Amino acid sequence: MGYAVYGAKGSGSAFVEATLLEIGVDYEFRAIDAKNHAQRGAEYAAINPHRKMPTLITPEGETLTESAAIVMTLAERHPEAALLPAPASRERAQALRWLMFAVGELYPLVELMDYPARFADEGEEAAGRLRARALAHWRSRWQTLESQLSNAPYLLGSRFCAADLYLAGLSRWDLPRAWRLEHIPKVERLAVAVAERPALRELWATNFPYP
Ligand SMILES: N[C@@H](CCC(=O)N[C@@H](CS)C(=O)NCC(=O)O)C(=O)O
């Protein structure tokens, strides 16, 4: 058995698929009917108790959840793909810094924006207000990242790393193109560079077909 990825098109499972494609290993994609909230059901909860996508099953049968842990584990298991810079290097520290920013500061806001009723007081109005505040933080945090990027396409300049594909994928959500071009053009350049990588073109087009 090879790797298996549970997920849905356009979701965080694309970050894991992108990592596997960059490594160049085969995997099986196991689609979850997220439109009908199948990720919340008992069947998937037996695989991922947090009921979120993605989940990775390794060839040894180990179950892994948490997208950043999955991406880092894959990078470690396949060092030949050089998806993370050398341990203890300055570049690795920066790659980990922004990967953790993505998973710890950016990604959690997506649940607030997509499912505000899970967190807000009863009523549509409260949920709407919470969503709007989360969206404002979401945009502001992207601008924080923008202020730290150079014009070279990737986070580390010309050297591609796992944090790039993670950030590029996240930047496809809730940020209209006109806003991206005006407020986070360096993030947009990074995302375009990732989308044009030969190993990723097809995956990107199927997961993030809109501009
Ligand atoms: N901390 C998790 C977050 C994953 C996550 O929020 N996934 C979204 C899809 S992009 C999800 O499954 N949402 C469905 C839900 O919350 O019901 C990770 O990094 O893997």
Image (tube, helix red, strand yellow):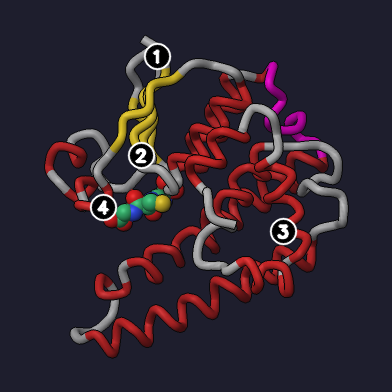
Where residue 35 is drawn, which disc sits there? 4
- Please state if 158 lies on the left or on the right of 206 as rendered: right
Specify the quadrant of the image occupied by residue 117.
bottom left
**Amino acid marked by disc 1:** Pro
Q: Position of residue 194 (x, y in %)?
A: 69, 42
Q: Which residue is mark 1?
A: 59
Q: Is residue 99 above or below residue 135?
A: above
Q: Is residue 29 above or below residue 36?
A: above
Distance CA(mark 1)–CA(mark 2): 17 Å
Task: Identify the residue under disc 3.
Answer: 187
- Type of amino acid at the residue the image marks with label 4: Lys
Dot 3 falls on a residue whose secondary structure is helix
Give the residue at x 38% y 70%: 112
- Could you give the CA–CA distance between mark 2 and mark 4, rounded to whole angstroms? 12 Å
Hey, what amino acid is under mark 3?
Answer: Val
Density class for disc 1 (Cα within 10 Å; few <14, some 14-19, many ≥20) is: few
Using the numbered discs, state the Cα–Cα distance from disc 1 to disc 4 in whole angstroms.
28 Å
Tell which tag, 4 or 3, sits nearer the viewer.
4
Packing grade of label 4 (10 A; few <14, some 14-19, many >=20) is few
Residue under numbered circle 2? 7
Describe residue 171's horizontal placement relative to residue 108 as left or right.
right
* Secondary element type, mark 4: helix
Sequence-first tag of 1 and 2: 2
Q: Nearer the viewer, mark 3 or mark 1?
A: 3
* Pair 1/2: label in front: 2
Q: Decide: marks 1, 4 in contact (CB < 8 A)?
A: no
Q: Residue at x 72, y 68 (%)?
A: 181
The span shown in magenta is 80-89
